[in-house]
Amino acid sequence: MKIQLFSDDILLIERWKEILKEDVHVVEGIDALLELEDKLIILNFNSCKNILYKIVEKNKVLVLHRTPNINTAKIVLGYGAKGYGNALMKEHFVISAIQTIREELIWLYPEFITLLVKEIPYTNNDKSSKLDGLTKREQEVAILLSEAFTYQNISEKLNITSRTVKAHAIHIYSKLGVKDKLGLALYLK
């Protein structure tokens, strides 16, 4: 599926084309954008924020924003967008977002995942029974991840490297059948 790009900022379009390194189509004008159906679209939030809800109802949309914030993320995802992030984010985030959306999942800028995890109300559920299939160290890491600690925070707290924390996180997600930190937090809370 050819990716459709839309923005009134030509520099953003050129940057996205360079990052994607695949055949893309630049949509010319709001009318052409509104006619799209069943397409994967990357668009600049500021270029179409007033009609965004019309675009996301018929397409898979990654909304990128020069000044992203958690409240806009909630609104955009509430409309039905499949992803939200920074318009100038690093190349690997854009590629990850596209891959995630193609897999029929939702992608969110990592900083916002941490903020959303912190908003999940805590319950007194017994986490240990949900973590039975994990090693003791994986259980420790899982609990800290679910409480929105970063890899760096966890590495310092448990006196292990960030790389080891990442390896544990990958095993935890796989064993528990969740995709990321937000999924883990929802599973455990």
Image (cartoon, grey):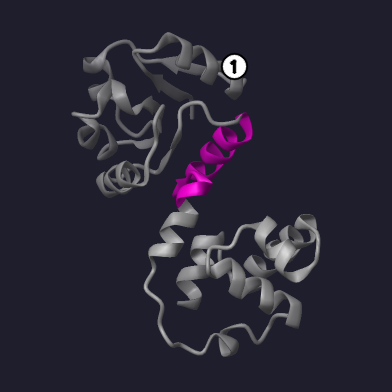
* Picture coordinates of residue 21, whole percent (x, y): 62, 20
Dominant SS of magenta comes to: helix
* Picture coordinates of residue 46, whole percent (x, y): 30, 24
Q: Residue at x 57, y 84 (%)?
A: 130
Q: Is residue 129 above or below residue 145?
A: below
In the picture, which quadrant includes the C terminus? bottom left
Q: Which residues are magenta?
A: 91-112
Element class at badge 1: helix
Q: Is 75 displayed left or right of 168 in the figure?
A: left
Q: Is residue 188 above or below residue 72?
A: below
The picture quadrant where one finds residue 23 is: top right
The picture quadrant where one finds residue 167 is: bottom right
Q: Nearer the viewer, residue 76 or 3?
A: 76
Q: Is 68 displayed left or right of 184 in the figure?
A: left
Q: Is residue 133 magenta?
A: no
Q: Residue at x 38, y 64 (%)?
A: 119
Residue designated by label 1: 18
At label 1, which amino acid type do we have? Glu
